[in-house]
Image: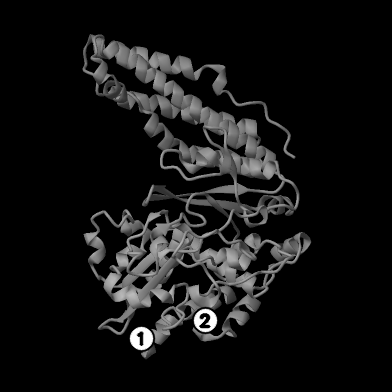
């Protein structure tokens, strides 16, 4: 038994879920936003707030009511009041029998088979695979209760797949080691952001006439899958269920520190819930893109391709909308001039290892969706063209600088003059300026001309910096001159010119 859960300090810490969420909902229109240390944690907290709003019945009943909710700033205090009226035990993070968001069935195995709390934090765990060296996970450096809570939510939402570091034979069964990629672990999540936290929640609370479904407080509250055989994915029963899915089986051990604060010093993590493919109504924010093999799937995060380079797909989701079917259709139905930020977040993972978070924000103004799409698509093409020009200039520099190269040296020699990496990093800010100008009503053609001019100037500067390493001799001067001439010639070709502006719909 977890007798320490009866101490006053632990009871107070266990209450942090109910108190913090209720406080946030009551003051949602006074808060600019919520912000956690990582984009993934922030999304996980927003997912929990949305789940509570749905469970409380605090969401619009129809598309028309959604617009009234957003424009009239419908208070979210009813959701806070509902939460405060719930049994405290349902929200106790360290409850002995039904800890919030966790699987109490792991309790008999936690002390012997658990690891240090670093395993709870996606960015700290490294490879989940139980056959790798995980000595860092054995350190029991305590994790503050609030940080552990956020890390747990993030695991449920973004945990990568692979094989869990837990013994199925000695715990709940062989399939508890089979970690599935959690609900948002393989795709970009897009959240519409308003001026306040309240605006953000209202923008993302979709109508759901069939009812909110079940809120997942803990693993043992309903009949869930076991871990003896491979399970079938279950179908969610509503948006409250969707936004509170327990993507991992997690159990945290609390510990009272010398200063009286509560922390987590040991955790056990295994496979969680497995979902059947989600219906369209549960993919309200999904942006679809086509893979190299021609398959269409929700936009995925990439370590090598920045999110701004995919923003045209996001604006296409708005411009090609079917009214009343998803988040983008509702946003487009708002009165012209209403500014919304579309915040995109994803986790880049290589197999079982989390690599990095990617996130970016893009402006949206109803009535400007066609202009924004054109700006994003053409801006991306211009950036691609400039990158290709830099690549050709680097090749020209290589031909002159290395007249008799060894084939094995070619790649490294060309890389010496290739400024494409710096180009992509330098283009992010001009691209966002382009979108802001298009959203603000500036002619797309005019904005694109300024954008293209800036990229051309920057490209020349970046190539010159790469060529600075050439020796001050005849070959060095010739290399510099021919590479620069090639870049200017390529930049001047028509395929980098902005297309004629289309009339905004």
Residue at (31, 21) in percent of width and height: 414
Give the residue number, with chain letter if any, for mark 1.
1
300 in relation to 197, above or below = above
**Position of residue 144 in the picture relative to residue 219 (left or right):** left
User: Colour scheme in the image?
Assistant: one colour
State the image coordinates of residue 382 (x, y, percent, origin top left). Answer: 53, 28
Residue 413 percent across, percent down from the top left? 27, 21
x, y (%) of residue 107?
37, 77
Q: Along the line of sight, which residue is nearer the eye, 239 or 503?
A: 239
Quadrant of the image containing the C terminus: top right
10 Å crowding of disc 1: few (<14), some (14-19), many (20+): few
Task: Tell me where residue 141 appears, x and y as whole percent.
Answer: 25, 70
Is 63 placed left or right of 238 in the picture? Answer: right
- Please tell me which of labels 2 and 1 falls first in the chain: 1
Which residue corresponds to the image point at 60% horizontal and 26% vertical from the top-left?
498
| Vertical comparison of 470 with 197: above or below | above
Packing grade of label 2 (10 A; few <14, some 14-19, many >=20) is: some
Q: Which residue is mark 2?
A: 90
> Label 2's element?
helix
State how far apart marks 2 and 1 are (Cα).
18 Å
Q: Can you see residue 269? A: yes
């Amino acid at each position: 038994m977890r007798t320490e859960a009866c101490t006053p300090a632990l009871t107070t810490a266990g209450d942090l879920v109910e108190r913090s969420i209720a406080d946030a909902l009551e003051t949602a229109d006074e808060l600019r936003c919520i912000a956690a240390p990582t984009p993934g944690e922030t999304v996980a907290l927003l997912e929990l707030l949305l789940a509570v709003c749905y469970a409380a019945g605090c969401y619009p009943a129809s598309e028309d009511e959604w617009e009234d909710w957003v424009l009239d700033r419908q208070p979210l205090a009813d959701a806070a009041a509902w939460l405060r009226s719930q049994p405290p035990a349902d929200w106790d993070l360290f409850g002995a029998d039904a800890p919030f968001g966790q699987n109490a069935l792991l309790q008999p195995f936690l002390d012997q088979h658990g690891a240090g709390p670093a395993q709870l934090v996606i960015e700290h765990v490294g490879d989940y695979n139980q056959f790798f060296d995980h000595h860092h996970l054995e350190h029991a450096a305590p994790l503050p209760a609030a940080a552990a809570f956020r890390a747990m939510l993030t695991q449920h939402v973004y945990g990568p797949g692979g094989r869990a570091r837990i013994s199925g034979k000695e715990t709940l069964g062989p399939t508890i080691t089979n970690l599935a990629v959690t609900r948002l672990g393989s795709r970009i999540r897009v959240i519409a952001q308003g001026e306040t936290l309240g605006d953000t929640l209202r923008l993302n609370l979709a109508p759901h006439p069939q009812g909110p479904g079940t809120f997942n407080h803990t693993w043992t509250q309903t009949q869930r899958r076991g871990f003896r055989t491979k399970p079938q994915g279950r179908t969610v029963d509503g948006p409250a269920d969707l936004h509170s899915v327990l993507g991992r089986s997690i159990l945290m051990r609390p510990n009272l520190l010398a200063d009286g604060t509560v922390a987590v010093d040991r955790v056990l993590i295994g496979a969680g819930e497995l979902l059947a493919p989600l219906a369209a109504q549960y993919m309200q924010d999904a942006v679809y893109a086509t893979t190299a093999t021609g398959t269409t799937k929700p936009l995925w995060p990439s370590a090598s391709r920045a999110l701004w380079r995919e923003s045209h797909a996001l604006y296409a989701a708005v411009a090609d909308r079917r009214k009343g079917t998803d988040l983008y259709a509702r946003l487009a139905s708002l009165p012209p001039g209403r500014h919304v930020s579309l915040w995109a977040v994803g986790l880049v993972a290589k197999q079982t290892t989390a690599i990095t978070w990617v996130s970016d924000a893009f402006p949206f103004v109803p009535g400007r969706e066609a202009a924004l799409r054109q700006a994003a698509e053409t801006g991306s093409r211009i950036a691609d063209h400039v990158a290709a020009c830099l690549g050709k200039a680097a090749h020209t520099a290589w031909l002159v600088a290395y007249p008799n190269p060894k084939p094995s040296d070619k790649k490294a020699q060309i890389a010496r003059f290739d400024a494409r990496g710096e180009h992509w990093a330098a283009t992010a800010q001009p691209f966002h300026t382009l979108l802001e100008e298009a959203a603000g009503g500036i002619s797309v053609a005019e904005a694109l001309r300024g954008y293209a001019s800036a990229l051309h100037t920057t490209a020349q500067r970046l190539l010159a910096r790469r060529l600075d390493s050439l020796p001050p001799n005849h070959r060095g001067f010739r290399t510099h001159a021919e590479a620069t001439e090639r870049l200017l010639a390529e930049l001047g070709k028509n395929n980098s010119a902005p297309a004629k502006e289309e009339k905004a719909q």
